Image (spheres, rainbow, N blue to C red):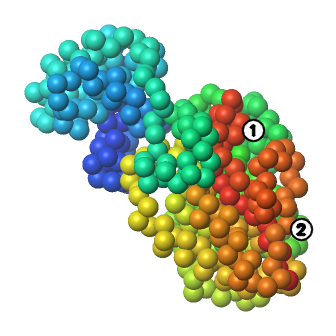
Amino acid sequence: MAEAQQGLAARAAALGLLSAIMEDGQTMAQVLAAPAGPLKALPPQERARAQRLALQVIRLMEPVDRLLEPHLRKSPPLAVMNILRLAVTELHEGAAAHGVVNAAVELARKSKRTTPMAGLINAVLRKVPEGAALPGPAQRMPRWLRQPLVHVYGREIVAAIEAVQAKAPPLDLTPHGETLPKGEVLPTGSIRLSEPSQVSTLPGFAEGQWWVQDAAAALAAPLLATKAGEAVLDLCAAPGGKCLQLAATGAEVTALDISAPRLARLQENLARTGLSAKIVTADALHWQPEGRFDAILLDAPCSATGTIRRHPELPFLKDDSELAELTALQATLLDRALGWLKPGGRLVYCTCSLLPDEGEAQITAALARHAGLRVERPALAGIDPAWITPEGGLRLRPDYWAESGGMDGFFMARLIAP
């Protein structure tokens, strides 16, 4: 009975997460950071389960709704629909129908908003078999994003990206020592864990032998190729995976970000890994360095459209209304950062976006604005030459390495100052 109640608590928390995202417009990160959020009373294992369930519901929402549609005369209230979605997601994953249906009915009876619909929930779910196959295609990206991506990449590639985004992503680690969890060593050196795990309990975590970082994101720092003793700026540094990579080369790293709470997380990870960097909380639009840098990594603010596989709520919360402001900000930051380089210094510009306006187009425009600036083609171990753009940037897409879980979408390019 205690186990059943614990499972019910995780499901209730998952519904709380869905409500905060779909009704209140919060990102998962915002909900998790809230002191009084839905997960506050749960032990770590159940917190992880609730979060996983909520994210999977969002990833599969469109096909789950298609499965439910023939069994509903009209769309029920969102709170009821989310109970149904959660239950169908569990059934699709192979959970026992008896337990799933009973839990859904009990969850409905816990709220005045959903109690009158408990009978409907019971009736609908009893028509859905265990291991329910979801009708294709995979959940589509919203029109504002899908349309330009189809124009750039074509329908087949966009469908392949969506197929990867519909699956829970594996956990990627960047190694820093020898005590490492067992996993697949990717061609670029990241370690990929296929099974969900509680990060803090894995071998080597407490000793700082590795950190969590998507395999695509982990390529930006090697592209900069910093050396011991170099003066390096990590611009927009938080949450800090790239900063740890830079510090591990022995470079003298200055890590700048506008967010003090996010930099606090970076400081914790520096302490855990035994690495060091100078932390600066400041707005890069107004901050001025004391001297120039040998190398700069600019991980510019962007639409984050390349991270939907890890943050499936983003398409529900965003549209293209911020793109013009973001691309203007990216160009301004790039110009400022180039002015902080020593002659012949190098800068890696990167964004976790699938949109060329935030990647390839920014580099083309920067080359036109800065005489003598040039792109140096990447020479990194493990990358496919097909990922290199004609201009010499690196375009990474979620459908790359799809058979082992894909990767985040990124654009990055290494610029050499005159």
Image quarter hosting the N terminus? top left
Label 1 sits on residue? 191
Q: 210 or 127, which is in the foreground?
A: 127
Q: Where residue 46 sits in the image (x, y, percent)?
A: 44, 32
Crowd band around label 2 with a 10 angstrom C-alpha radius: few (<14), some (14–19), many (20+): few
Q: Position of residue 178 (x, y in %)?
A: 83, 41
Which residue has dot 2 on it?
Answer: 228
Point 43% across, 22% down: residue: 134
- Do residues under tags 1 and 2 come within 8 Å of each other at their CB atoms? no
User: As rendered, which of 1 and 164 lies closer to the eye?
Assistant: 164
Task: List x then y, in percent, for residue 343.
Answer: 86, 85
SS at mark 1 in the image: strand
The vertical placement of 354 against 51, above or below, is: below
Q: Which mark is residue 13?
A: none
Residue at position x 61%, y 68% in the image: 300
* The quadrant where residue 89 appears: top left
Q: Is residue 380 left or right of residue 77?
A: right
Q: Quadrant of the C terminus?
A: bottom right
Q: How many marks?
A: 2
Q: Residues within 10 Å of mark 1 (few under 14, many from 20)?
A: many
Name the residue at 59% across, 65% down: 357
- Is residue 367 found left or right of 294 in the rendered image? left
Name above or below for residue 353 compared with residue 130. Answer: below
Q: Amino acid at mark 1?
A: Ile
- Residue ID at (88%, 55%): 379
